[in-house]
Amino acid sequence: MISLTVNGKKRNYKGPPFKRLIDVLREDFGLTGTKEGCGEGECGACTVLLDGKPAASCLIPVCQVQGRKVETVEGLGNPERLNPLQKSFAEHAGVQCGFCTPGILMTASRMKKTDAESVRIGLAGHLCRCTGYMHIVESVTKTPKGRKR
Amino acid sequence: MARPSPAKIGIGIVRTDAPQKLTGTAKYIDDYKIPGCLHAATLRTTIAHGRIKKITFDPAFPWHQFAIARAADIPGLNNVLFIENDQPLLTEDKVMHPMQPILIVGHQDRAQAYEALKHIAVEYAEENPVFSIKDSLARRQLLRGEDNIFKKFLIEKGNLDDGFSQADLIVEGEYKVPHQEQAYIENHGIAAWVENDGTIVVRGSLQCPYYVHKALVKIFNRPPEKIRVINAVTGGAFGGKEDYPSLIAGHAALLALKSGKPVKLIYDRAEDMAATTKRHPAIIKHKTGVSKNGKLLAQDITVFMDGGAFATCSGVVLSRGTLHATGPYECPNVRVRSCVLATNTPPNGAFRGFGVPQTIFAAELQMEKIAAALNLSSLELRRRNSWKVGTITSTGQELKESVGASKCLELCVKKARYDKKRKEYARWNADPGKPTWKGIGLALCHHGAGFTGSGETILASRAAVSLLKDGRIKILTAATDIGQGAGTIFTQIAAQALGMPASLIQIEIPDTALVPNSGPTVASRTTMVIGRLIERAAEQLKNELMKSTGKVPQDRTALKKAARLLCDGRSAKRFEVQYEKPADITWDDDLYHGEAYGVFSYAAIAVSLEVDRLTYEIKVRKVTTAQDIGKAINPTLAKGQIMGGTNQALGYALLEYADFRGGWMRNSQFTNYVIPTFADTPPMDVFLVEEPYSRGPYGAKGLGEMPMDLPAPAVVSAVHDATSFWFNEIPVRPEHICSELIKAQRPL
Amino acid sequence: MRGAPLSMTVLRPQSAEEAVSLFADNPSAKPLAGGTDYMVLWNMGGANGQCLLDLSGVKEWRTIRKTAAGLSIGALVTHAELRDDPVLRREFPLLARAAAVVGAEQIQNRGTLGGNIANASPAADTFPALAVYEATVKTVSRKGTRSLPLLQTFSGVKKTNLEPGELITAIDIPYLPKRPHRQLFRKVGTRAAMAISKTVAAALVWLERDRTVCELRFALGSMAPTVRRLKAAEEFVKGKRLTAEVAAVACELLKNDVSPIDDIRSTAEYRLRVSRNLLSDFLLS
């Protein structure tokens, strides 16, 4: 059995140890907000926070997550109560088709420097084919500071 | 008198689906948990051309645990009906390209389904394949008909010989563009099941529910009401989910029918890239006659496109490419000849721009070459020839309104400080101590909105606005929101027409059981054509509300009251409208003459870039673009479309290259098929120009595709400005600059 | 997703000792560190049925230690940790900078230096930096420990000289002579970020006041089956004043130590020309 914390809740997983974290989240825990875009760590859609740091959940066998903390988009806010980062993405059109969005939100949520250039470098591990990135950069740079993001 | 309701259009309201998409609650197809479902995998051909001799199933493999669907299981036609009938759902015998589907295997465990594929051996009898436009044209092997040609067109205007004889200068050029992958971030995926009453239901990532519906009716030989197609939230499409979902839906539904279980068929990235459609590669030749004062006198243009193995929509892509091949320029004498040819590669298909990025690339670079030959700035050459009200186009269409070409051009060069930059960069480049070469390039284009010629008349699209007795208002349309924000735009249009808050209006899921056939979500037609239908339907509802209650309700309670009155015991009152051809639009499909499009949109772009003098890496520094879209219903979303399309085109110009060898895409991964990242993408200044179109909703015309059309030639011009090398082919990569430098024996 | 979880066997040692012992008993097992390469292959269905030695429970190999001679970087230190480590940034900035351009944040947080070395990609961005720092790879197996100079660790594309049962424990980097030097790290990839290198260079040079070369170290990745030091060019410039002529000869000699190829990412011609440009610019600037 593998024990981990997901969005602050203790979860136990009893299946095969070499199942990918993304599949455990989506299939075993029903957290389908985390998306698979490429299965090779290139697109960033599957990004979750592992002990607070962005990681590609399609490249992590769940056995490596024993005792660790995982955060997914479901932990940020809900449709009725978006968090400030999510609100900013809504207001600045940082979302189009939405498939890359959960992963981007996870990386952006832990970004320390939020000037435009730092955001461009910090989010470079996320591919978005819809927006041309400008509105996403704006969404992050214009998120109000000083509150829990 | 009530005060006029505040404007609902022309403002950047938050997209209606944002809360779901931002919280991971929006459901894409693989997010549906379907109890008892089988995961399907597709066995595909490994040769480019030939026949299947034998299929052998490994006798030691536990096949009883698997469901298998083969061509013999198809109740109706083994054909994916689209424009032609040439593409089989499953290959029985004749192999026309690698990655052609042969059979479908299903298992509860996705990995097991893939594992099974390794236990099926296929023997082939190979035939000579054809992989290039040149070889297909030379009929090195006959793949189709007598000439390998899917479709050809001829446009003629004036007299070409007269034009060339009057010309002071004749300029010739040949241009080449490659495949391009749509690279939506959500791969293809469909789920299918069979209801107790025999209805086949498919839900998936797709942009045209009624295309899938039409194909499935024939494949399963069922009445239309026994086929139901539902659009799931779709993670990008860009044309890539126009026709291919019909195949996947057919495969998934066939296995569901065979096994009696629901089926999910979700592609992974490698399969998606290698098997599904790409932008058509093309070779385009120009011969242009000009006067010495820079007026175009004759344009002779030849367009060859590579269609791949089956027709799909190649003929229509070619048509649009052909109709845009002259660029937005007046010329009295024109001939455009074009054809699309068969090759043994997976079929090419729809991709944002739909033939136009190819022909505009050639047309705009040709303008640069002409300008250079005349020793005139290309800006000035464009000024002297660009379309205006009253222009007669190559098909004899008179442009009567909404021609923003020169407005876009002037605004763009002003905002980009184009002339100043050119001089500044020339000084920079002359200094050998600088680490880079800098350049700026310009392009201008047009894009016809809506279906070509008589297309919209044939489609006769329908859309509706429905007042439910519980007081909800629903917009009913098969036009899908594939990320572009169609649902939000429709909501804004309906709210404006009704004079009612947008929050009172909802969009129905595009589900063929619930919404009328609005035609496909393609061709920059959604806002302009379907938006106009929704505007008309909403106006009808408004009139009814005014008639029965004397005012338009402004809140849910008032709406509920009005709904009870209007619905009169029924569950809903529906106002449905259909596209009607304006009387003064005529089109001759045989002569390719007349109103090719109801209206054109226009755009100009300036691209600034730097080339590293040590590594030849090309860094785009700034994009400035002005785009005439008639009216921006939602300026924020409009800019999002423009920036997104522009970035796809920057990828087309500089990075993206599908490495086809032996008919296979060898780099079908995001690792090696490289698209722009955050770090590659420059800041963009987008300016909206609004030259209203009298038949669009509130003046709006097409927007979605045009941003893809014009960056590539501007990039190539900018590279020329920086390095003095002309490239007639994209992508322009550092390797090409390096080769040119070595050839030129130019020092560092 | 084509990986089959049920087909996999996972060994999960909780200490270095246990890892060595489990590996010795299961020499066909694949050591798994951050998994950023292995999992790609596995997702494509290319590694089903294998036995894995999951090293994520081994805590001993996760730290960067200061020793009298230099730094000892545990094999399981991630690229993000290398990128952010203050001592490394000060003493071995080329390695910190290389670590910062390996994939992006999500990969840097997972991929480890030891895993990177064991994977032996010719395009690995950290190898040229390790090569000019003259790093040593420390290993352990049931037979005992070994030290391999970095350049002798690799035997070909994705091939190492590690033996079955042998695990990388650390990468040791000696301090540089405390004399002023110039340095270079430059990655030339397929795009601005998340790129695989077409060529990647790291270099150090110690010069006399009159620009006579005391020592040049110049390494290139993606230019041969394994990372290469430019031995011929380094030897040639030693003791010479850096003139344009000397640099030109060094650039000519560059090709003696590399064998670039044409592939999906680039061309041999480009790789060679750009590598020469980088060398020339480094020597003459």
Image (tube, rainbow, N blue to C red):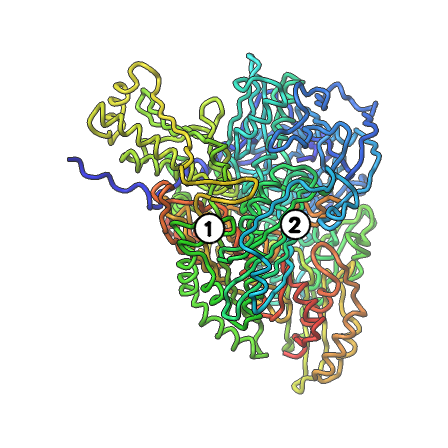
Residue closest to the eye, B220 or B317: B317
Residue beneath disc 2 = B304
Question: Is residue A61 visible in this depiction of the protein?
Answer: yes
Q: Is residue A138 above or below residue C56?
A: below
Residue C271, label in figure: none
Residue furthest left in the image: B1
Tell me: B246 left or right of B444.
Answer: right
Mark closer to the observer (2, 1) = 2
Residue beneath disc 1 = B642
- Give me the residue at 40% from left, 37% from top: B583
What's the chain of the residue with tag 1? B
The number of numbered badges drawn on the structure is 2
* Residues packed near mark 1 inside 10 Å, few (<14), some (14 to 19) or many (20 plus): many
Percent coordinates x, y for residue B450 in the rendering? 47, 41
Both labels 2 and 1 in a single chain? yes
Decide which of tag 2 and tag 1 comes sooner along the chain. Answer: 2
CB contact under 8 Å: marks 2 and 1: no
Percent coordinates x, y for residue B24 in the rendering? 48, 36
Residue B342's image quarter?
A: top right
- Give me the residue at 59% from left, 24% from top: B216
Q: Is residue A72 above or below residue B247?
A: below
Residue closest to the eye, B690 or B437: B690
Tell me: B388 left or right of A15.
Answer: left
Residue B468's image quarter?
A: top left
Residue closest to the eye, B714 or C57: B714
Q: Secondary structure at mark 1?
A: helix
Q: Secondary structure at mark 2?
A: strand
Residue furthest bottom in the image: C210
Percent coordinates x, y for residue A61 in the rendering? 64, 38
Please name the amino acid that badge 1 sits on.
Answer: Ile
Question: Is residue C100 visible in this depiction of the protein?
Answer: no
Q: Quadrant of the C terminus of chain B?
A: bottom right
